[in-house]
Amino acid sequence: MADRPARRSPRARHATVARTERLTPHMLRVVLAVDPADRPEIGEFTDHYVKLLFPPAGVDYPQPLDIEAVRRDLPREQWPRTRTYTVRAWDPDAGEMTVDFVHHGDEGLAGPWAATARPGDGIDFMGPGGGYAPDPAADWHLLAGDESALPAIAAAVEALPPGAPAKVFVEVADPAEEQKLLGGGDAEVVWLHRGGRPVGEALVAAVTGMDVPPGDVQVFVHGEAGFVKELRRFVRVERGVPRERLSVSGYWRRGADEDGWQSSKREWNAEVEREQEGGA
């Protein structure tokens, strides 16, 4: 259901941790220094993403990492596990790539890595991919998502054309998870605090209940797959927004890790397309 082109490099690159920062109780920032001889092309999109590669315990890969050789020569259990993360910022002069991680203690793979990362630690990644950036021709912009989409939403707000109207809805656990979103556009930012409610419940209610401005809208909705499906129906079926004006994707799904979600995502997307495009 990602209504955007996917562009990504099939080969691996190497980076080292330059510094880390805790932004909120559950959001960590890691700044990665990328090999100057192999810097990625980043800057066209605000939703650029990379796939971080985590080797299984006890497995070390020769550098530079040849991912095709790993998949050809090693058993599957020794292949790296991938986790997809937005490039929050890219400094081409310094060759530094900023990545923000949602961290919930020892849960997951990438979050715990980010929590223990220290300057000089190495990590391989593939990418970048991406396909969305605010269109200066749009009359207004709609941006909505949860914590997993916050880095891309923040980057998009920063890239809004001067004075561009935008309605921005971000659902987080509580007020402590809010961040300042700065940019040159005219962004109306609404923070929604989940509390004990299911992920996306407050977000769906706020977006579907908003006063919809007139004119051509460009839409960015990303995050947990369940609410993404509901909001895609709202903008595509109920509001009639053309597909080419949508960037909509489930970054994750409740009850599934990324390995499980990615293996079923294509089929799930196709099912949503069949359900919703017939009514659009």
Image (cartoon, rainbow, N blue to C red):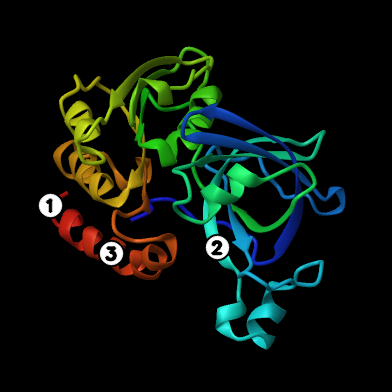
Residue 109 x, y percent position in the rendering:
52, 56
Disc with the residue nearer the chain's start (3 vs 1): 3
In the displayed structure, does residue 91 sit left or right of residue 126?
right
Cα distance in 3D space between marks 1 and 2: 35 Å
> Does dot 3 land on a helix, a strand or a loop?
helix
Q: Nearer the viewer, mark 3 or mark 2?
A: 2
Cα distance in 3D space between marks 3 and 1: 18 Å
Q: Which residue is drawn at 32% across and 19% down?
A: 190
Contact between marks 3 and 1 (CB within 8 A): the answer is: no
Instruction: Kindly identify which residue carries mark 3.
Output: 268
Q: Identify the amino acid type marked 3.
A: Trp
Residue 224 x, y percent position in the rendering:
32, 47
Which of the numbered marks, if any, corresponds to residue 279? 1
Disc with the residue nearer the chain's start (1 vs 2): 2
Q: Identify the amino acid type marked 1.
A: Gly
Disc with the residue nearer the chain's start (3 vs 2): 2
Cα distance in 3D space between marks 3 and 2: 20 Å
Instruction: Kindly identify which residue carries mark 2.
Output: 82
